[in-house]
Image: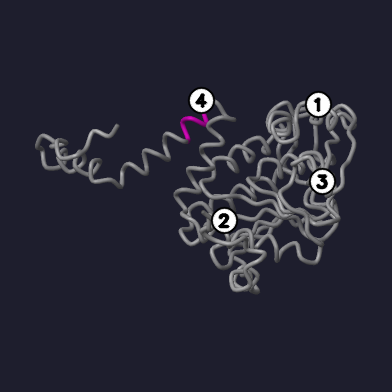
Amino acid sequence: MDIVPIMPKRHKEAPLDKDLYAPIEWRSVAEYDDIRYEKADGIAKITIDRPKVLNAFRPQTLVEVSAALELAREDAEIGVVILAGAGEKAFCSGGDQQVRGDTGYIAEGASLGRFHVTDLQVQMRRLPKPVVAMVAGYAIGGGHILHICCDLTVAADNAVFGQTGPRVGSWDGGFGASLLRDLVGTKKAKEFWLLCRQYDAEEALEMGLVNSVVPLDRLEEETVAWCREMLALSPFALRLVKASFNAHEDGYAGIQQLAHDTNLLFYGSEEAREGREAFKEKRSPDFSKFPRRA
């Protein structure tokens, strides 16, 4: 007996393609100095806007990205977030070495530096909505790790990936090592860090570092199509899928997130409501009507 798929692959289904690839009109939501935050059709787009330094981030940049992610999280209209870099030359070239000091990256007016990017990486992974990296040009150093922390990566054919830490007296033993190893394997991940080589988009696709490679002039169109495809799916299921991956990768912290999400799902059940309402009505709960599932 022939097995009929529920839905044909979208690239062979013209009516579906038309919806996914419809034009999108971004509107600015909040004003920042180092980034742009826009949204449209259920999608938020956060763009690092420092093209003169290949979208390298300084502390202010990361604080602003964090604030925009929080806006996207609290916005019930938003289901997916795109992270991008301004222009065609770079997604993000990592930390701005001009503001790097002995204690970390130093914000304007501060005496001590810190690594805001560590907090941002965790926030991206804890965000209960998918985050898609839209990569044109260089995704290097800390910028490379940002795309790794995203759930999906759509790359332009001019994209370049790599780590530069040992060249500038730096490294990342956190997500920059562990997630990279999970994506491309231990030997290849060590090659990234021990040799500081750079890899083009097709090489990145072949090693499983990115999900898709498209012509530069179609990058946003394709990324938006991927986002729209996710927006057609169950938002809570997507939230739990993301948490499930992180539960394995993040140890107890990941398990805590998955437990929180499943508890939130349980709160919407009749069984949970019975416990809550019985407490409010100062009576004993009656759980006998609920099945003891095998």
Residue depicted at 79% across the width and 28% down the height: 102
Which mark sits nearer the N-terminus, 1 or 3?
3
Mark toward the start of the polypeptide (1 vs 4): 1
Judged by depth in the image, the label closer to the viewer, 1 or 3, is 1
Residue 228 sits in quarter: bottom right
Between 134 and 222, the residue placed more toward the observer is 222
Q: Marks 4 and 2: in contact by CB < 8 Å?
A: no
Q: Amino acid at mark 4?
A: Tyr
| Residue to which mark 1 is pinned | 187
What secondary structure is marked by label 2? strand
Magenta span of residues: 252-257
Is residue 247 one of those drawn in magenta? no
- Residue 146, percent across and down? 71, 43
Disc 2: which residue: 80
Q: Position of residue 105 (x, y in %)?
A: 75, 36
Nearer to the camera, 5 or 212: 5
**Residue at the disc numbered 4:** 252
Residue at disc 3, secondary structure: loop
Disc 2 versus disc 1: distance between alpha carbons?
A: 33 Å
Disc with the residue nearer the chain's start (3 vs 4):
3
Res. 271 in view = yes
Label 2 neighbourhood size at 10 Å, few (<14), some (14-19), many (20+)? many
